[in-house]
Every structure is written in structure tokens, then in C-alpha cells.
Image (spheres, rainbow, N blue to C red):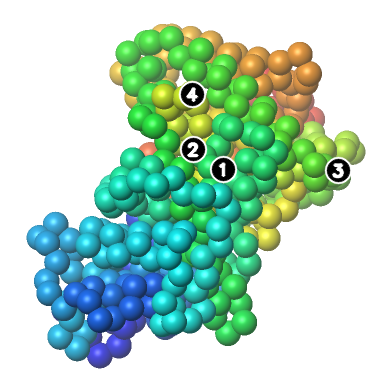
Amino acid sequence: MTADRPEELWWPHVREARWFQGKGRDGKLSSVTPLGWLVPPGGDVAVRPELAAVAYPDGESELYQLLVAYRDSPPPDDVVVVGRVDGQWVVDAPRDAQAMSAVAQALALETPLAEEASGLTVRVVSPLPQAELAPRWYAGQQSNTNVFLGTTALLKIFRKLEPGENRDIVITRRLREAGVTDVPALYCFLEGEVEGLRYDLAALTEQLRDPQDGWALGCEACRTGSDFTAHAAALGHALAAVHHGLRRDETTLDGGEVADQMSARLDAAAAAAPALLPYMPALRRRFDALRGRPVPAQSVHGDFHLGQTLLTADGWRIIDFEGEPLKSFAERLAPDSVWRDVAGMTRSISYATSAHPEPSGEAALNWLSLTLQAFLGAYCGDQKLLDEDLLSAYEADKAAYEVVYETRNRPEWVQIPLRAIQHVTSSVTPDGGEQSHAHL
């Protein structure tokens, strides 16, 4: 298609993209602002980041990165053309191998960016191993876009942007500096500046060897009734190592304030997903159990689940430290309880039972119980007691978030977190206690 304005060109693509988080909010693309040329014009392909602002009827707005390739010749048939501008083909660069080959050369640590890349800077963290960097777009995208470069590196292109440092870059770098090897190495990252505001646009990281998706492995293990306890224990140990590596900024939160925040998120969740309304009183009682007690807090993963783990030739690795995508940037940066991450994994393990032929049957529930015990036992080890009140509150908070996410993105899955909500609320007594405890 051709269009007089870039907003008209890109909006059909943006609103259907997996990484677009405004589905169901009646937004519109209000502006597209180009940055400098990462790959300048002069060859058959030019590439630059462009920032797309999406406005919503309630006055809120979001900013997304488009990595745009402009081609003098048509791309291969497997590359989706977004449109035509001034006789050139316009495509989403991550899916164009020729464009990404040029980007990889621009990001090679020994190659300075051209003068046309005004406002773009490559920040080097550690040497990139010398190797072939043939690009391959990763189809299993979520909130960001990943492009494999040979067998050595992975380019993560951040889609939803906030001013300031990207949390994934900051925390991954801190963990590696602390000697934690349960996360990928960081080679460099790309930042851009617009009107005095800095944005982290992409990160070049270690490509893990022979990675297997933790979510797929967990689901397959439950479906077939295979023992997953050794893997669950390894994940518990890895999460404990990450938390230890991030412990230098420990602080304490007021339990009442944590309960208030959870209740406020519940109110917002119920407004977006009315299916939560019948369960709100019991969920509030779950949160109220935290009142009157201190809650230790620090930097955490923030969105931990099986899909944020990879089983590699070198063991389990934890990835993607950006935090929950539906939370504000300030919420994701704030210290939180380590039990948020623990609850994220217990909820994810529970989700994996949906792959079983009888998710509520005895075999699936027995698999779930053994797997949870292995994970929690390894995480706690000999150093930490299981905090049932905190874990239960964070599990309930997470399940409410999941109901909103599934309502907006996968309505056919919404019964999975709703079953968890039903379970936890059925065990809460009117005074806030429990008839019996079982994890969601």
C-alpha cells in the first residue's frame, strides 16, 4: 500500500503485531518520528529506528520502536512489505535478512556508526566473539523482537519504549558483574536520543547453545506424565542465585502498602476483566494478611515464568528482565519481594497442567504437586523458610493479572487463571485465614 503519512502506512501493521500491548483499547498511531540511520542510504537497503506514538481515548499514550528497512529492490517473498514510499519498498527490518546483515555489521564492535546515525550510540560491555553473524528472525515473538546472528549472538530489539535505561540491560549487566552465570552475557546495546530523552533500543547478547524453551518442556512433561522435578529444582537454584546477585539494594516495604497496591491493581484488573468481580472480597482478604508486617524487597526478575527460562547445553538460563509488560516503567523499576518471582514460577508450573489430557485429574495434580515441591524446596534450600502468606498473596496478584492478559490477548485461555482465582478464594475464610493451603 502507499500512504501520504507514515502513521497511515504503519498502523495496520502495529495494531496486529504480537508486541503491541494496546489491543482492545481503541488506540491510533498519532506520529512516527525517525531517528538516525543505522544503515545509511547509498546501498540497496537502508535501516533506521523510527518511534511510533500510539494515543488512546483516555489520554494515555505509548511509544513503540519500528526498525524500518527501505529497499530499492523488492524483498524476498517471505518478507512482508508494509508499503511503498517514494518508490521504495518499506519493510519491518527484523524479518529482512539482507537488512539485518547490514545492521549486524553496523553493530560490530570494531565498526563505528556512520555520521548519518546522529543520535544513535553503541555502548560496548564485553567483546563480541569473532564469528559469522548470518541473521535469522525468531518467529516465537512476544513483547520484543529477536534476531539470531549466526550461532554466537542474539539481537533483542525492544518494541515498547520508556525513557531511561532498559531494565533488562541494567539487571543482566549487574548479574554478570556479580558472577552470576545463570543469565546470558551482554555484549553491547544501542541507545537513541530524541529531544533530550534517551531510549535503549536494542541489546546484543550471548546466543545460548541448543536452547529449549522451558514452557514447552514443562507442558510436554505434564502432558506425558514425565518427571520434571530435577528441572524444577535446577530452576529453583538458578532463581536463588539471581536473587542473591541482586541483593545489594535490599530494603523493606510496609506490608499494608503492599496490600494496598495489590488491591489497587485488582480494582484496575476488574475494570478490564469483569469476570474478576465476584472474587474481589476474598482476594482482598488474601492481600490483607500482609498488613502489619514488614516485607523484605530488592531488585527481582519481575516477570518470572517458564517462558523466561531456557534449558541449554550448559544448564538452565534465565532471560528477559524487563518486568511485566502491562505494568508502568516506575512499577517495574521499584524494589519488590522475591516472592513475586517465586509466585510467577508456581503459577507458570500450574499453567503447564493445561497441556494434560485431564488438567484437573489426579495424574496432572500429582505432577503439579511434586514439581512445585521440587522447585520451592530448591529455592528455599537450607537458608530460607517458605513464607506462605507472601507467596499466596503474590500468587493471587499474579492470577488477577493473568485474567486481564488472557481477556485481552487469548480469551479462550481465560478460564485457566480464573480456575486459580476460584481455588484461592474458596480456601479463604471471612476473617482472612485459610481452610487449607494449596498453591495456585
| Frontmost residue, 235 versus 283 | 235
- Is residue 189 visible in the rendered image? The answer is yes
In this view, 307 is above or below 123: above
Q: Where in the figure is residue 436, as x and y percent of width and height?
A: 68, 16
Badge 2 vs badge 3, beta-carbon distance below 8 Å: no
Point out which mark residue 252 bears: 3
The amino acid sitting under disc 1 is: Asp
Residue denoted by label 1: 303
- Local SS, label 1: loop
Mark toward the start of the polypeptide (3 vs 1): 3
Task: Nearest to the eye among marks 3 and 4: give it.
Answer: 4
- Residue visible at 61% across and 77% down in the picture: 197
| Frontmost residue, 73 versus 9 | 73
- Residue visible at 82% across and 38% down in the picture: 295
Badge 2 vs badge 1, beta-carbon distance below 8 Å: yes
- Tell me how far mark 2 sits from mark 3, CA to CA: 27 Å
Residue denoted by label 4: 315
Mark toward the start of the polypeptide (3 vs 4): 3
Task: Nearest to the eye among marks 2 and 4: give it.
Answer: 4
Badge 3 vs badge 4, beta-carbon distance below 8 Å: no
- Crowding at dot 4, Cα within 10 Å, few <14 / some 14-19 / many 20+, comes out as some
Badge 1 vs badge 4, beta-carbon distance below 8 Å: no
The amino acid sitting under disc 2 is: Gln
